[in-house]
Image (cartoon, grey):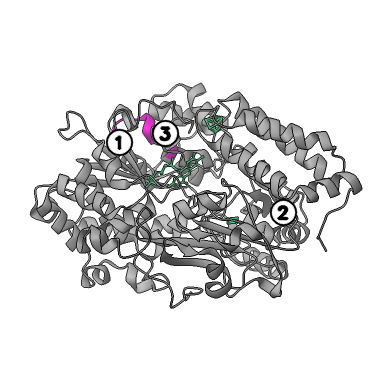
């Protein structure tokens, strides 16, 4: 298996270690960094992280699977997370979710054939006054209406992957 | 983006610079008196800082409303081990969207507040625990922190005072329960974010087993103003028991949703009708959740006399929580919205306590069944029985929070449940 962190990523990993009193506390930031490098956190990646932080592999698996943001399997280049929690829901989030599924031609949680899109439901993203809030990779889109969805998708297709 | 809406009835102490991207720069912050409160605090000494914050009556803005100065006074006065200040920036309570705004529009205000609090509780290390979804926000915060380090406001020998305080931004992994203070500490330590049994309380055994204090972003953002102007100044707003200003996050069916900073005790209906421009499309009000999804619903009648301070909302039959005011109009499908909230709690339950793990999952199923027109009247009694078993029986209050909207909606909107059960159709829904 290839080395997990190299160059700039290795430097960032080493910096993370300096911020905590022990290596275990660096686990979440290290998982986030690993996901940035690999796109998702596979069981192999978890084992690598365990080695780097001198933790038991089973422990790392137990922690990783507790959190939703570490993708345990590959996802589309654009991970579309539509908040359907209460404030967005009151303002039509279900229709926005439907529009994303329709225009990406996917089922909830499944990746499109071209590997571009995975659409999932999200819990409240702390932008409830700007409904519907949609997180696409690292970026927040606010006040999204169903009518705007095709435009957003076209834009993403032409812009490539964008920062995670 | 210009800040969406403002009102001239607001008292913008913490939110004055929302919508102004230049205000987040360190030069601008310093120009308007920034980091002077920190300097003043260093001159006062830690105990005088705690006394000033006690005098202000500032209460925790993360939901529980515990007085900040009192919490700080629980920390050991003569440290024998490292102390930690943990800033809770996990903001995930449905309906709440103030901490992200505070961090991205005025990051130095938060950094300065953190430093003063750390000094008061004799901590040399601060962790700002941000929910993992806040990539963009933490970039703003990280830039501000870098600048503050470069200018000597954070780090070694701050402002030549001999005080060393470091700040680390820590990103979570996506789990609501990490906003609960002991779940936060476990998550920070690289564990699953499961809440701990209390006692011991964080001031005795907190992060890494050391004395720790957890405060919300908004609580800490108020601190520089209190130190600059004094506790009595802060008390010019609000009520005797709920002093000061508070950010109200208004969402749902109003014309102008958004964050509004108002004196505590502000009348709920004036917030909706005047500040937020009334109900969307001229519809009638059906219900309000005044404090985020964890508190009971109020019906329109209860809203009428409700003042938005901790005591006022309690008197009306709910809780102020984090002042996340979710407004629902006459066409709202209450059963669907309650089901959505309970499904959230089922998803976020950390699973250690049986009443919570099982209760939230079963409630979701029963509510789904009712929503689909396959419920029975006994289901309502079952839901109420479960709510009772889920309240006050678990390690943290997530379980109680899940029960709150169920109980209050069955009490106040029983006809909607019954209509679905009896006719398989919704009342008042177009
Ligand atoms: C399930 C649950 C979730 C919570 N989420 C948050 C949160 O996202 N942010 C927050 O500041 N407090 C949250 N709290 C409250 C914290 O436990 C804690 O009381 C608060 O951070 C203390 O800060 P304060 O005294 O300044 O309000 C949550 C509590 C519970 C039970
Ligand atoms: S009440 Fe629920 S969320 Fe809280 S500790 Fe128990 S199982 Fe976990
Ligand atoms: S409910 Fe959608 S962002 Fe809060």
Q: What is the chief secondary structure element of the magenta stretch? A: helix
- Location of residue A88 (image quadrant): bottom right
Residue tagged 1: B212
Determine if the C-beta at disc 3 is less than 8 A from ligand 1.
yes
Which label sits in the foreground, 3 or 2?
3
Quarter of the displayed picture in which ligand 2 can be seen? top right
Residue B355, image x and y in percent? Answer: 62, 27
Q: Which residues are magenta?
A: A21-28
The residue closer to the viewer here, A125 or B11, is B11
Label 1: how many Cα within 10 Å (few below 14, some 14–19, many 20+): many
The residue closer to the viewer here, B302 or B81, is B302
Residue tagged 3: B182
The residue closer to the viewer here, B4 or B22, is B4
What subunit carries mark 3? B
Residue tagged 2: A114
The image shows residue B259, relative to residue B188, as above or below, that is: below
Check contact, mark 1 vs mark 2: CB within 8 A. Answer: no
Tell me if B322 is positioned left or right of A71 in this view.
left
Which label sits in the foreground, 1 or 2?
1
Tell me the SS state at disc 2: loop
Q: Which mark is residue B183?
A: none
Q: Considering only order in the chain, which callout, 1 or 3, is on the residue closer to the N terminus?
A: 3
Residue B366 forms part of the magenta stretch: no
């Amino acid at each position: 298996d290839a080395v997990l962190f190299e160059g700039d990523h290795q430097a960032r990993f080493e910096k993370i270690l300096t911020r905590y009193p022990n290596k275990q506390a660096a686990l979440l930031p290290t998982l986030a960094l690993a996901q940035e490098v690999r796109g998702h956190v596979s069981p192999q990646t978890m084992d690598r992280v365990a080695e780097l932080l001198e933790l038991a592999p089973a422990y790392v698996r137990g922690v990783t699977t507790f959190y939703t943001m570490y993708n345990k399997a590959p996802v589309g280049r654009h991970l579309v997370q539509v908040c359907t929690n209460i404030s967005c829901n009151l303002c039509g989030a279900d229709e926005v979710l439907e529009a994303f599924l329709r225009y990406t031609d996917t089922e909830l949680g499944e990746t499109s054939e071209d590997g571009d899109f995975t659409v999932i439901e999200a819990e409240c993203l702390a932008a409830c006054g700007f409904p519907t809030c949609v997180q696409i990779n690292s970026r927040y889109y606010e006040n999204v209406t169903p009518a705007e969805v095709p435009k957003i998708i076209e834009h993403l297709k032409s812009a490539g992957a964008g920062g995670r | 983006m210009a800040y969406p809406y403002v009102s001239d009835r607001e008292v913008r102490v913490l939110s004055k610079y929302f919508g102004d991207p230049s205000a987040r720069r360190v030069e601008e912050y310093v120009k308007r008196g920034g980091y002077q409160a920190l300097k003043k605090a260093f001159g006062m000494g830690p105990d005088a800082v705690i006394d000033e914050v006690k005098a202000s009556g500032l209460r925790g803005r993360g939901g529980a409303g515990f007085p900040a100065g009192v919490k700080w006074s629980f920390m050991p006065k003569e440290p024998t081990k490292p102390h930690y200040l943990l800033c809770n920036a996990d903001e995930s309570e449905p309906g709440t969207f103030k901490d992200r705004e505070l961090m991205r529009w005025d990051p130095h205000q938060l950094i300065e507040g953190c430093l003063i609090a750390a000094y008061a509780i004799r901590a040399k290390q601060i962790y700002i625990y941000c929910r993992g979804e806040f990539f963009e926000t933490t970039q703003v915060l990280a830039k501000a922190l870098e600048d503050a380090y470069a200018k000597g406001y954070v780090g070694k020998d701050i402002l030549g005072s001999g005080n060393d305080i470091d700040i680390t931004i820590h990103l979570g992994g996506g789990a609501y329960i990490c906003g609960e203070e002991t779940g936060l500490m476990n998550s920070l330590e690289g564990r699953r974010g499961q809440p701990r049994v209390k006692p011991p309380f964080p001031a005795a055994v907190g992060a890494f087993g050391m004395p720790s204090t957890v405060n919300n972003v908004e609580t800490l953002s108020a601190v520089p103003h209190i130190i600059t102007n004094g506790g009595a100044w802060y008390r010019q707003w609000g009520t005797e028991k709920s002093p000061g200003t508070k950010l109200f996050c208004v969402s749902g069916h109003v014309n102008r949703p958004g964050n509004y900073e108002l004196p505590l005790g502000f009348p709920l209906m004036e917030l909706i009708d005047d500040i937020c421009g009334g109900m969307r499309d001229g519809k009638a009000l059906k219900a309000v959740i005044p404090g985020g999804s964890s508190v009971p619903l109020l019906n329109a009648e209860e809203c009428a006399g409700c003042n938005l301070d901790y005591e006022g909302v309690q008197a009306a039959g709910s809780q102020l929580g984090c002042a996340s005011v979710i407004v629902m109009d006459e066409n709202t499908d209450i059963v669907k919205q309650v089901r959505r909230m309970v499904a959230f709690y089922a998803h976020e339950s950390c699973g250690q306590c049986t009443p919570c793990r099982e209760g939230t999952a079963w409630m979701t199923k029963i509510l789904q069944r009712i929503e689909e027109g396959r419920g029975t009247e006994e289901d309502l009694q079952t839901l109420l029985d479960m709510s009772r078993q889920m309240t006050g029986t678990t390690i943290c209050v997530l379980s109680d929070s899940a029960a709150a909207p169920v109980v209050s909606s069955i009490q106040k909107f029983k006809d909607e449940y019954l209509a679905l059960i009896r006719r398989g159709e919704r009342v008042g829904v177009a």
